Amino acid sequence: MAASISILPLHLISRLSMKKILFIQILFSLVLVPGHTQGTWSVAKHYTKAEYQVEMRDGVKLYTIVYSPKDQSQTYPILMQRTPYSIGPYGDRMKRRLSANEQLVKDKYIFVFQDVRGKYMSEGKFINMRPVLGAYDSKTDVDETTDTWDTVEWLIGHIKNNNGKVGMYGVSYPGFYTVMGTINAHPAMVCTSPQAPISDWFRWDDMHHNGAFTLPLCFNFFQSFGQDRPEPTTSSAPRLQYDSDDAYHFFLDIGPLKNINEQFLHGTIDFWNKLTAHPDYDAFWKSRNTLSHLKDITPAVLTVGGWYDSEDLSGALHTYETIEKNNPGIVNMLVMGPWIHGGWNFPDYNDPSRIPFREQDKYFYLKAIEYPFFSYYLKGKGSMELPEAWVFETGSDQWRSYSSWPPENVIHKEIYLNDGGTLTWSPPETPGQPYDEYISDPSRPVPYTASFISARRMYYSRYLAEDQRFASTRTDVLVYKGAAMEEAMTVVGPVDVELFVSTTGTDADWVVKLIDVFPDSATNLVKNSRGVEVGGYQMLIRGDIFRGKYRNSFEKPEPFTPGKVTRVKFSLPDVNHTFRKGHRMMVQIQSSWFPLFDRNPQTFTDIYNCDEDAFRKATHRVYHHPEYPTHLKLKILNRVSNSACASAPPSFN
């Protein structure tokens, strides 16, 4: 997210004009944090602003703005953000907010903001998720790790009254740059906090989920963000103008993906051209995988993510997991909260569901986690008593702390699809009806949301907790429901899926959704100002899509043999959810999630460049047979054996 608009998530930025963004920034600066009002405390009163062109090792100069405390009686640590989204305002005007965390601003840091190479006022050429090329001491190769190193080296030597310590943080794309600053880190970089960081653009972040293309997100993002910039500028690239208030029909009417270039982009967006030229997980995408470089990490790391982040939920989880695996003994912590993308930075406006979450303190993360983390490592204040993992537990709606994530003491259980649309804890015993089937028609894809939203929006931010009753009534969605819970059960960590399927086509997508079904009697379950009917509510807990041709390898896709039973295995991203007593577990299976993800033609082809005649109806079967037992593997929390927070779940009717 942009330093100048750092309280806005990417999906909001995508559909707002710069004028509206600036207006919302000013509005948030007045109301976001309790006690912050214009006139009582201001950045301009306590900080001075200076602008620099910081030269990198190859001679390219990066535009950098520094806000230093006016009180020069002591030294201060540096807290840095690097962004591709503009660090403005430029010139004499000052930011009204230096951070979403007002406690940090009032506690006095040297705040540094930098336009990354090739964006806004910085020189050079911008490369999306620029691959790591060289070591910190390379004289010829430059990447985001060397640019961060060179910037820190310059800041330590040129900015007065710094204490020699640097921290770095950022959300989304700036989260990626924070990860880059964590790799081959400068000795002065003592702590970093990658927040919703991008980690792998093909397998699970932003652009693809398991090989399926995130259509509206990429279309709306790259039409402006992907435009080449001939010279440094304070302005953003213009967006396409088109008429549509209905994303579903807009993208359906476009037809095959290749029509986007022919009808709208006309070959002018270089990165769009590249991504459509690399349909599989080849060197182009692998070079942009940050995880392979997360070794020999020296800063303390606090990775932050949201359970309802449609963009980079997996990026946060995999970043933490990989650092933990490759760097034993370092300080490496995880926070996962009840947030949409970047929602922790605007807690009053974070709204992952039409049913409000019951957080006792929406500012818990900013006050009790982020503030003490930077205070301890950059200023030596307080004590570092944060747990390894702070994770919000949905369902019971409270924070839990663990010494590891996922928790170690769990019970492994499988839940099986069975006859009559049932879910059982034991596998099918008799052949019975060995499968359920449905016709998947690319001309009538299953929508991912019941809401009608503008095609200009990247996605509907609430869909990851949305009521799935709208989908369960379709004939091309299979529904399996378990018995009412006799006692509360908490599912933690990733959910492993093992499907046994067949198709009359040669390719297919498989969408699996884990759902919490509220009892019909749950009329007073929550204080509900929106009038949502919660009796029978089918709340999506976790869902994801898998492009079937990648079932054995993302590098080498394989067609399905029509009619042959085939195993498809993948994992849904982590959860931390309590199914309360009386609730039921549900699994829904379908083969499209449109237009969030592009349509699979259901023929084995290059989907980015195929024609309309490649799209065909197919009959898909999902098996629940003793020989082909489709099931989900769950990790059930053994709460007696875990050091979870002592607070008991709240009581509800």
Image (spheres, rainbow, N blue to C red):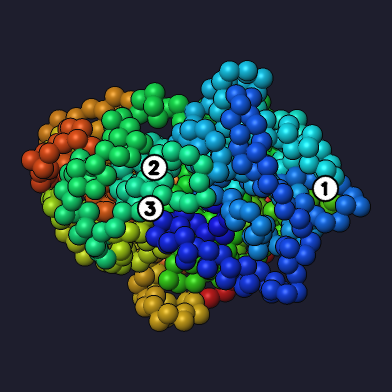
Image-quadrant location for residue 482? bottom left
Q: Closer to the camera: disc 3 or disc 1?
A: 3
Mark nearer the N terminus (2 vs 1): 1
292 is higher (above) or lower (below) than 237: above
Q: Secondary structure at mark 2?
A: loop
Tag count: 3
Residue drawn at point x = 48 percent, y = 33 percent: 125
Marks 2 and 3, how far apart at CA = 11 Å
Side (left or right) of 615 relative to 401:
left
Tell me whether the residue at label 2 lies in contact with that at label 3, contact meaning CB atoms closer than 8 angstroms: no
Relative image position of residue 36 (x, y in whole percent) = 70, 71
Q: Give the class, few, some or many, for how many residues have Cα within 10 Å of label 3's Cα (few <14, many ≥20).
A: few
> Three-letter amino acid code at disc 1?
Tyr
Residue drawn at point x = 82 percent, y = 56 percent: 70
State the residue position of label 2. 226
Q: Secondary structure at mark 1?
A: strand
State the residue position of label 1. 76
> Three-letter amino acid code at disc 3?
Pro
* Residue at the right extreme, as displayed: 73
Relative image position of residue 336 (x, y in whole percent) = 57, 52
* Residue at the top extreme, as displayed: 139
Q: Closer to the camera: disc 2 or disc 1?
A: 2
> Three-letter amino acid code at disc 2?
Gly
Q: Secondary structure at mark 3?
A: loop
On residue 238, the disc is 3
